[in-house]
Image: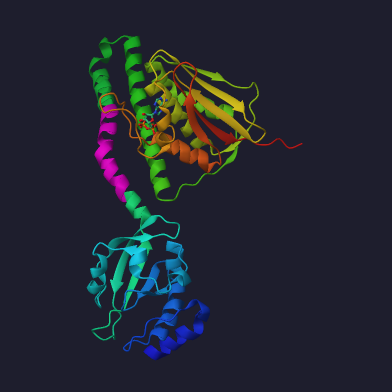
Amino acid sequence: MTSARHLQLETDLPEPEPSRNFEISPDQSLDTSNLVSWLDSLALAIPEGIALIDSCGKIAYFSAGAEKITGWNREELREKSVFEIFSFRDGEKWLELAGCEPLEECQAEALHRDGFPLPVNYCLVRPVNQNVESKTSILVFRDSREEVAARKLRAFFLANITHEFRTPLSSLNASVEFLLEEIQFLSKDEIEALLTSIHLSVTGLQTLIDNLLESIQIEAGRFNISPRTSDLEKIITEAQRVMSPILTRRRQILKIHKPEKLSLVECDPTRITQVLVNLLSNASKYGPTQQEIRVKVEPVDENWIKISVIDHGPGIPSQEKDKIFQQYYRLGTKSNAQDGIGLGLWVVRVIVEGHGGNVGVREAPGVGSIFWFTVPSVRKTA
Ligand code: ADP
């Protein structure tokens, strides 16, 4: 029965390329050449990485999945010690731990061929039927970047997000309670002021949730942009509408400078609106009250349109100009910092770069910052 199945495997599956196998160290108790070709055929169908580690700790076999995950070609690893590519928590003692039952899944780091450390989850097992002295082991591993990112995000979320939700929620609660209790005694203006405050809290929460959802998609590698021919005019109007309660509360005036006729843009309109809302809410949050915020739209050339948001805030120190577009990066000491979690500009960068555009910041003449980004314009056909 076993041999029939084995035979079937050998005839049905594509022949492994002999040139891609390299010899493994002799091991009396194991028919290694058979094992290597069997593994090779099987491994073609398995996205996880499989490495066979010989008694001396050398990598004797590296599957196609392993090559894809680490970027290393098996020929490059010929005769290399597994410890040159993987760092295990237990160091070299690790091989001793292999048993015939797979160990619980563990975390390690692989050195990617491009030079960066790659988090991996792995299991290690010693094939059955080999003698006790022999230490040939099979390492099965997979890229765990997504899991690590999700873990990091979860930890960050729990540590920081409570405050970010609690502030607008408390304000919402207080306004609604006050309205319910006092509505018959309030003037129209007072009711309007309370509703504006409620609108403000809801807008803040919505922007926060949008950025968090976007960030989860990005971290999980499921961030897709669906560009289509879009009206930039409508995008700006929508961003203005979203921002209006915040601007009203801070008594800031938004001025739009744009060519009379705007060309169409090739973009994901919801995402570009989010970019503009993020930049405008920063301009409002970090800028002084009762000041003007400007949006300037200008063509760069026939392929690109540049949109700038100009504020009168404290500006960005030149050594921080690139860093503020990193995830969770924030400026300012605890005492003078505004609320925030350092996701907005990162999301802006990922969305803009996803459209093939650029993003940056420079000083505004006098005081303040100019945050700008580019979007592809739709070329007019002759
Ligand atoms: P958050 O505002 O939640 O901290 P962002 O990613 O939007 O996150 O911004 C990152 C940091 O960049 C902020 O903490 C702030 O210090 C700085 N920043 C962003 N926009 C401005 C601005 N218009 N003026 C001054 N500083 C800004």
Quadrant position of the C terminus in the picture = top right
Q: Position of residue 145 (x, y in %)?
A: 37, 54
Asked whether the viewer can see residue 268, the reply is: yes
Asked whether the viewer can see residue 17, the reply is: no
Going 45% across and 83% down the picture, which residue do you hit?
9
- The chosen color scheme is rainbow
Q: Position of residue 190 (x, y in %)?
A: 32, 11
Location of residue 138 (image quadrant): bottom left
Location of residue 306 (image quadrant): top right
Going 41% across and 32% down the picture, which residue do you hit?
319
Please tell me whether residue 156 belongs to the stretch shown in magenta: yes
Q: Which residues are magenta?
A: 151-169
Going 41% across and 26% down the picture, which residue do you hit?
316
Q: Is residue 229 above or below residue 290?
A: below
Q: Is residue 87 above or below residue 352?
A: below
The secondary structure making up most of the magenta span is: helix
Q: Position of residue 76 (x, y in %)?
A: 46, 69
Query: Is residue 264 or residue 124 the one in the foreground?
Result: 124
